[in-house]
Image: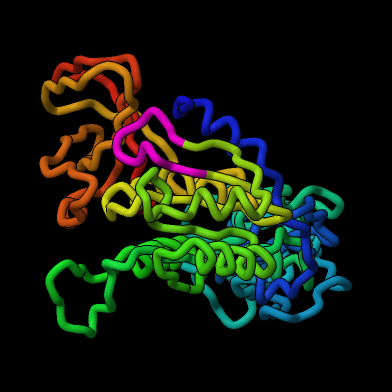
Amino acid sequence: MISVEQAFKIIDTIQPLDPVNISIQEALGYTLAEDIISPINMPPFNQSAMDGYAVNGTGDRFTLVGEIKAGDNATSLLLQQGQAVRIFTGAMVPTSATSVIRQEIVEKSDSSIQITSSYEQNQNIRFIGEQIKKGSVAAKEGTLITPGVLGFLVGIGIRTVSVFRKPSIAILVTGDELIPSNESLTPGKIYESNSFMIQSAFRSIGYEATIDGVKDDFEATKHQFATLISTNDLIIATGGISVGDYDYVGKALEELGTEQLFYKVKQKPGKPLYLGKNRNSYIFGLPGNPGAALSCFYMYVAPVLAQLTGRRTPFCPPRVVELTHDYTKPKGLTQFLKANFKGDTVTILSHQSSAMLNIYTDANCILRLEENDTDWSAGDEVVVYPLSS
């Protein structure tokens, strides 16, 4: 059995998947596999920041000599001292202009303008390269492509990007006691919900996963794992990882030559947690209890996914908040507790059983209490992992 910190360090060694080149329009949710260098200045010319008048000079009255709208080429337009042109937001500002005066402080006659308030030189001009200069790094390797990043890259003319491939993911459900939710419950059976819960957890952070099931049979379990390993980068098995007579996940993986990265972590919930590697596939054995399985997804599966996809920022970034009440736990296990945080404070919720999910109707974070600590007082700082950004 290893500590939580040791498990996290093992996860940190996992390398990203091979990069692929894709169209920038398809890149939302991917992570850059290399730095992006800007091919242009942005803006590519001096640009008006608002509707108004581009002027040359420092006075309050100017002769009006023309108009520049967005899209016009004003490269050859030379404003003389005391001259102005009508200009619109986004339009090219002549290099001879010394300022753009907002239209709200201008009184216009047929051939001149009168400025009614003070203004500054170089006002309301977005200068060439102000956002980014040609040859500069526009986005670094490891940057997640969000709508804003995508828009920025398209705006500087990027058409394709090298990104870390998204993994193919499979969920394998084990357990003869499980039945689909569209069947009637009979004595000894329960509805299978783990697969849909884990699949939804993947979807909530932008990834798809297929679902497969297998009966509590050694040969069937081994065959199913062999098939999934040949076609997936990440496999999540729920249940069957403990030491019961019908727990075949660990035995099947061992016979298939899987390298065990860790098995059993000094934590509650989810002590019988397994992570292995077979060829290019990483395999998790999550506890069968749904509360424990979901906690392990957030604390371990999501970080492995971040490693595989080259993310620099975690899916559940930790933050430090203050506990609203006293709390005591036994020494010896790290505890991951469902909790509710508001602002800079957090409250630990009741009903922390590994078998229960109803607590997630109120929980918005997982709170981490360290292995060798036992007592906390109201106002003490603790680490929480928000379950949504």
Q: Residue 378 is drawn in which quadrant?
A: top left
| Type of secondary structure dominating the magenta stretch | loop
> Which is more toward the observer, 305 or 49?
305
Highlighted range, magenta: 264-274
> Which is more toward the observer, 180 or 88?
180
> What percent of the width, then of the height, locates residue 215?
41, 69
User: Is residue 265 found inside the magenta-colored segment of the image?
Assistant: yes
Q: Residue 20 is drawn in which quadrant?
A: bottom right
> What percent of the width, then of the height, locates residue 102?
53, 63
Q: Residue 343 is drawn in which quadrant?
A: top left
Residue at screen point 74% across, 75% down: 23
> What percent of the width, then of the height, locates residue 29?
58, 64
Residue at screen point 23% across, 84% down: 182
Image-based side of 204 in relation to 192, left or right: right
Q: Is residue 297 above or below residue 193?
A: above
Image-based side of 140 in relation to 348, left or right: right
Image-based side of 176 in relation to 165, left or right: left
How is the protein colored in the picture?
A: rainbow
Residue at screen point 49% across, 43% down: 274
User: Is residue 39 found inside the magenta-colored segment of the image?
Assistant: no
Q: Is residue 89 above or below residue 250?
A: below
